[in-house]
Amino acid sequence: MDSVLTADLTGGQRAAVRRLLDVAFDGEFSDEDWEHSLGGVHFMVIEEGVPVAHASVVQRRFLHDGRSLRCGYVEAVAVHPERQRRGLGAAVMSRAERVIDGGYQLGALSASGAGRALYLARGWTPWQGATAVLAPEGVVRTEEDDDSTFVREVPGGVPLRHTATLICDWRDGDVW
């Protein structure tokens, strides 16, 4: 398992990870999705010099119950289709969770339908309250993301009121 800061990824590594994401997401991984996965730390399972599993953790700011929280946000979790169901997704998530637990006040992610079972099995909690984004025009509800948002409470972190509104910071593309 490799852990690499975005700043330390070589051009070849960046290209190989992007190819994996394009294959794993069947061409539905946008340039904005790729941009969201950069700026933090990447966890990769490498086989024969090629990444076959990936996850990244980037820092974001969330608002919850009147507080601004440092969030370790999980992005770009993918396993090559020919390598799925072998524990590789769990392996990259284990490393991501270690970083979140040691460096953030909470963890969060937006789960695809295919990824829900992995996150539930690992103890991630579906958010029960409303979701919103702090957009340029102010706080805007994101009802379409209510069912896909998952959180991870970290040891010694801030207790979360799971029925309250969780507000993420603004970014281009999908905000969650």
Image: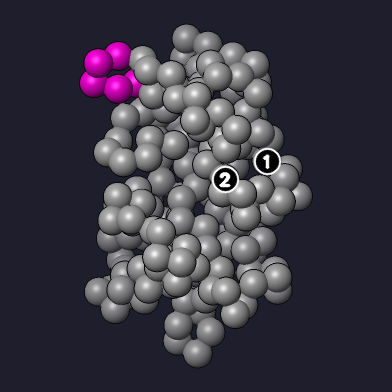
> What type is the residue that disc 1 sits on?
Trp
Is residue 28 toward the left or the right of residue 99 in the image? left
Q: Nearer the viewer, mark 2 or mark 1?
A: 2
| Percent of width and height locating residue 82 | 59, 80
The answer to which of 103 and 47 lies nearer the viewer is: 47
Which residue is label 2 attached to?
Answer: 111
Q: Residue furthest top?
A: 66
| Percent of width and height locating residue 133 | 39, 24
Residue 33 visible:
yes
Residues rendered magenta in the picture:
134-138
Q: Are marks 2 and 1 in contact (CB under 8 Å)?
A: yes
Which residue is label 1 attached to?
Answer: 124
Residue 151 visible:
no
Q: Quadrant of the N terminus?
A: bottom right
Is residue 175 toward the left or the right of residue 93 in the image? left
The answer to which of 41 and 25 lies nearer the viewer is: 25
Q: Secondary structure at mark 1?
A: loop
Q: Secondary structure at mark 2?
A: loop
Within 10 Å of disc 1 (Cα), the crowding (few <14, some 14-19, many 20+) is many
Q: Residue at x 52, y 58 (%)?
A: 77
Q: Residue at x 30, y 50 (%)?
A: 32
